[in-house]
Image (cartoon, grey):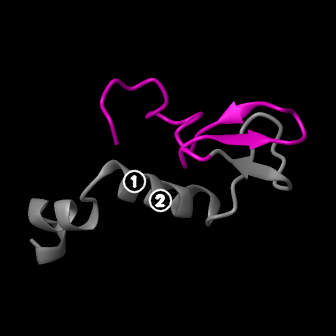
Amino acid sequence: MSEKYNLFYFFKQFPDEDACRKYLEKRRWNNSPICPHCCNAQKIYRYKNGKTFKCAHCLKQFKVTTGTIFENSNISL
C-alpha cells in the first residue's frame, strides 16, 4: 500500500475543519462558489465566519456541504 494513503498522511493533510472545508471548496467549485439553489456563479458573498455564503441572485445562504452527504451530518468535517 502506498505511503500517501495512510492515516498519518490524512491527518497531516487535514489537521482541522478549516483545512477540510478549503479542500471541499477547491474540489467542488474550484474556489469559485456556485449557488446550489439557483446555480448562480456571480456575486456570491462569504460571511465573516468563513463557512457560510450568500447568493445575491436568490438571496439564499449555503455552505460547501449544502447538497452533499455532509449536509445534515452530526460529525464535523
Relative height, residue 26 to residue 46 (above, below)? below
Q: Kindly give the residue lying farthest to the front in the view shown.
A: 48
Magenta range: 48-77
Relative height, residue 53 to residue 33 (above, below)? above
- Find disc 2 in the rendering and name its residue: 22
| Residue 2 visible in the picture | no
| Residue 27 visible in the picture | yes
- Find disc 1 in the rendering and name its residue: 18
Residue 62 on the magenta segment:
yes
Q: Give coordinates of residue 64: x percent, y percent.
A: 56, 45
Q: Quadrant of residue 75?
A: top left
Q: Is residue 37 left or right of residue 53?
A: right
**Could you tell me how far apart the alpha carbons at marks 1 and 2 are, in whole angstroms?**
6 Å
Q: Quadrant of residue 1?
A: bottom left
Marks 1 and 2 in Cβ contact (< 8 Å): yes
Q: Give coordinates of residue 7: x percent, y percent.
A: 11, 59
User: How would you classify the magenta stretch by its main secondary structure?
Assistant: loop
Q: Give coordinates of residue 43: x percent, y percent.
A: 85, 53
Q: Amino acid at mark 1?
A: Asp
- What crowding class fits label 2: few (fewer than 14 Cα within 10 Å), some (14-19), or many (20 or more)? some
Relative height, residue 34 to residue 38 (above, below)? below
At 58% from the left and 35% from the top, the residue drawn is: 66
